[in-house]
Amino acid sequence: MGQRTGPATRRGVPGRLPARSPVAGLRRRGLTFPEVLAQSVSALAPSAAMVVVPSIVLVESGAATLPAFGAATALVLLVGWCLTQFGRRMAAVGGTYSYTAKGLGPVGALAGGWALLVGYAAVAMSALVGASVYLAGVVGLRPTPLVVAALAVPLGLLATLCTVRGIQLSARVALALELLSTVVVLAVLGVLLLAPRGGPGTAAPVVDAGVEWGGVAVGVVLGVTAFMGFESASTLGVEARRPLVAVPRAVLWTPAVAGVLFVAAAAAQVVLLRAAPLDVLTSPVPVAELADRQGLGLLRRVLDLGIAASFFACVTGSTNALGRVLFSMGREGVLPRALGRTHSRFETPYVALGVVLPAVVGVPVVALAAGGGPRAVLTASLTVSAFGYVVAYTLACLAMPAFLRRIGELTPLPAVGGLVAGVGGFLVLVAGMAGASWSGGRTVVAVFLAVMAPGLAWTAWLRRRDPGRLAAVGVYDQATASSVLPGSVRTSR
Amino acid sequence: MTPAIDRGLTGRQPKAVQSALAILEAVARAGAGVTAKEVAEDVGLPPATAYRLLNLLVGEEYLVRLPDLHGFALGRKVAGLTGSPGPAQLSTAVREVIGELRQQVRFGVHLVLYSGPVLRCADVDPDHPLLSTAEVERHLHATAVGKLLLAEQPDWRDVVPPRRLVQFTERTVTRPADLDAELRAVADRGTAVQAGQLHEGVSCAAVPVRTPAGVLVAAIAVTGPGQDEATAAARAGHAIAFADRLGPLLG
């Protein structure tokens, strides 16, 4: 391949370095590594997942809960590693959407990009409902649909203001909230573990249920959904300091640390729930239920506050990422150019963030007003988002070997890694959709396919009618005339 | 799967340092647009190792990936490795433009050349010499020409670590956040001003000289007495037309 590409590129490529990056306008190189990490961590919302997901997995996988979490962590780490192959080579603003473009071309990228938009938007909605439900619990209100809807509007507005004001502010707020809530969850689990427990409760047969492959598969799928959003630091290519180092690091560290937290939380809950009655296990937040029954009402309030904080951070994190993917599409001209505008003072993609607000707040509020239970809205939008994420991840993983081949840097390890991660992602998607269909969630699958349809239709239309607009897909913060050694590359005169 | 590369190099990996330097040399020798595969063959490293080191050097901005993503070029940081360059060879045409400006204003007119993150006083006004050329070249946060250079960087902290924001006078900007704000203003305005920040009672305005492609290559500095920012900025007005004339001569 070297012989073929080498001499041609050497003559052809240098000389046309632009003076301005195609994604100029965002505040350049301002975020330190902890702030970049905060983006991924907040979109993942570890503490909310720590208390909600293990018990769901327990019901499905029984004694295989910990191995299921281990397998999910391994798969997500592999996906993360695939994404770092892009992250070390290009500073993107569109996350996996921009990555996919470099391997699968514009059509694959738009399919993955639309799925990513669905993922970020749906998880923002879900987290908004979650934040409202738990906030209601903190202030002592019953989380009726009306109360939740009434809380969701100001919370959504506040989150969007945070994101428009600046990524640095929202990252710092998010990191503080996540740290606080993770500490709270760990403390609550610790207190419960230290409290005296009786013998095995009525939930013990479920907790120690024999291993069935179907159950383990569903457990892995659910475990994977707990990590969704871990890659969102990849939308900070312009704003991160040393992005080619910081972004891949954040994308790999986030699932590694979250995996440890999840396995620890799952292990603690296995021990706790074995001694608990069955109705605790099937309650929405068994940890909080346990705290209540131990007579630790205050602990429950603190836990609610922690979870609400985590969910709120997740709203800002997902909205940040969502706005930046839309911003990329606006800059490319695939979506209206106005989405690519940035605020002159705050240097954030304020148009894209503003467009997102009515959807993120409006959809759950309408669903709640139409009589949907807050829990149902929360889990349904979370499931839709998980499908979106998995589609985006799968396409990006499959794009990775193709990308490396195109630039002549493919080695055996990434080739195998990309393939395994891609196939793994695909299996998770199939198992998840089948699982959702069995358990009466057929509507959720239908909703996901319905929201994917406009994006795919738009892509098909562009492909047929206006292929020129697809040519720009995949913009990233590329090298400019001022990033090379002066005089080493000819710049256009 | 361990991100060994992310931990950077430690002093116990001499081989890696040697290989990284060999890669830098290979890119410098081959010229912009050389591919990773060519570099690996040139240096004689296994491809996976070479690609990892290339990515590391790109991450540290000593190398740059060209927009096609498979060609490499030397990054602007490499300019900083060359240390203080020898005396500048300015063409007669450039000297004439500067001389013409000096005849028209009553203040000190100096020409400063930029090379990546490095600044050099190439032509100091013999009638109004700078108080200290060395300090101007070294303390970029306290001078107008330095701020112009820092405002052009993706991240000024790469060039001047925040702990090296030395205080010269009461007016010197020493807080990173303040410098952030000031550099943003410089980027918006296009010119930079320093009033009594390096030496009491001396102010300076800097007008950028850009190549037709927009690359910052030099600056005209106009220095004079007083420490009022508006006065200092007004002095630079005259130099803008001259900076425009210098662009094609230096680009």
Image (cartoon, rainbow, N blue to C red):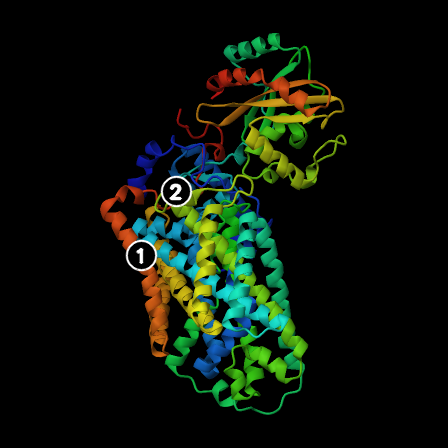
Residue A259 in view, yes or no: no
Where is residue A155, by image quadrant?
bottom right
Give the number of the disc on residue A387: none
Query: How crowded is the residue under tag 1: few (<14 C-alpha within 10 Å), some, or many (20+)?
Result: few
Q: Determine contact: label 2, label 1, CB under 8 Å.
A: no
- Residue B29: x percent and y percent? 43, 33
Q: Nearer the viewer, residue A473 or A312?
A: A312
**Residue designated by label 2:** A337
Q: Nearer the viewer, residue B242 or A479?
A: B242
Residue at the image position 52 percent from the left and 88 percent from the top: A278
Q: Nearer the viewer, residue A123 or A137?
A: A137
Residue A486 in view, yes or no: yes
- Residue B122: x percent and y percent? 59, 19
Give the number of the disc on residue A454: 1
Residue at the image position 39 percent from the left and 76 percent from the top: A217
Q: Earlier in the sequence, mark 2 or mark 1?
A: 2
Could you tell me the amino acid type at mark 1? Pro
Task: State which chain disc 2 sits on.
Answer: A
- Residue B210: x percent and y percent? 50, 24
Could you tell me the amino acid type at mark 2? Arg
Where is residue A367, by image quadrant?
bottom left
- Residue A479: x percent and y percent? 44, 38
For the residues beneath circles 2 and 1, the answer to whether they share a chain is: yes
